[in-house]
Image: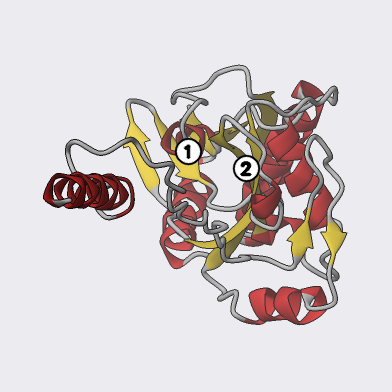
Amino acid sequence: MRVILIIVLWVLLGIFYWFCKDKCCANGNGGAPVSEIEAVTPIEKRVVKKLTPLKFACSDAQPNAEPAWVAFRDSLVSNLSDDSQLQIQGLYSKDESFSGDTDLGMARAKNVLKLFENLESDRVKLSSGNKGDECLQEELNNLIAFRYLKNTKKIKEIDDRTLIYFPFNSTKQIADKEIEAYLNDVAKRVVASGEKVRLTGHTDNVDSDAFNMELGEKRATAISNYLIRRGVNPNKIMIRSKGERQPIGDNKTEEGRAKNRRTELQIVK
């Protein structure tokens, strides 16, 4: 009887052991592998601040103006000081396709300019820039950039000529104290001496060759008109344009293009 009782106890202990092994020790080193569900960190959507109320579709140069555009545009114009220029820069990505005469960025800038009312062309500078490799949906309101450029008129005398730089894409009357003072001295000299003045207009390579030839001539004419108002005989002034054909700076950089936007003044005996 005692033997039977001992056998029964051993059986019960064995059952209890296997029960604990399977249920309580499954996560131990000797336990069977347990299927686990890995915690997945949710991917947060990247939030990109909308910089302008103008939206473009990828590979499209036409802007879609949102309701806030009018107030945004008017604010840009009202904050444009007399000695500043508004730069409109169109941006594009490498994966965008475009078949226009210019790159997609410049095409976007030109189309945005059309949305401005009563903004004179000499107060605006258009440019383009690469934004990256890929056109992203969350960046479609950030494909145009606005900034103010300070007027940096300069006069530089080299050899037998003087370079007069135009800060704007201007064809209007000269309105800068530094340039006016220099031209006043030129006018006094040639009126007294009977010398002639040769004016040669130059531009950067933005836009077409024909456009730049005309622009260069208009810049030279603007200086000619000022000299005439100061008493210089129109027959003593020679005007010509070289457009973009004789750069003195690298047209691939903003600094170089600024050097190329000039009128050269020579006094001829």
SS at circle 1: helix
Q: Nearer the viewer, residue 69 or 13?
A: 13
At which x and y percent is residue 134?
A: 62, 33
Q: Residue at x 79, y 73 (%)?
A: 69
Q: Nearer the viewer, residue 85 or 103?
A: 103
At which x and y percent is residue 35?
A: 43, 41
Q: Residue at x 52, y 22 (%)?
A: 247
Q: Residue at x 25, y 45 (%)?
A: 11
- Residue 195 at least partly seen: no
At which x and y percent is residue 211?
A: 79, 31
Any mark on residue 254, and which?
Answer: 1
- Residue under numbered circle 2: 127
At which x and y percent is residue 19?
A: 31, 50
Q: Residue at x 19, y 52 (%)?
A: 5
Q: Are the two marked residues, 2 and 1, in contact with CB atoms closer than 8 angstroms?
A: yes
Going from the N terminus, do you reach mark 2 or mark 1 first? 2
Residue 93 found in image quarter: top right
Residue type (three-letter) at the residue carrying disc 2: Ser
Above or below, comparing residue 28 to residue 93 in the picture: below
Above or below, comparing residue 17 to residue 246 in the picture: below
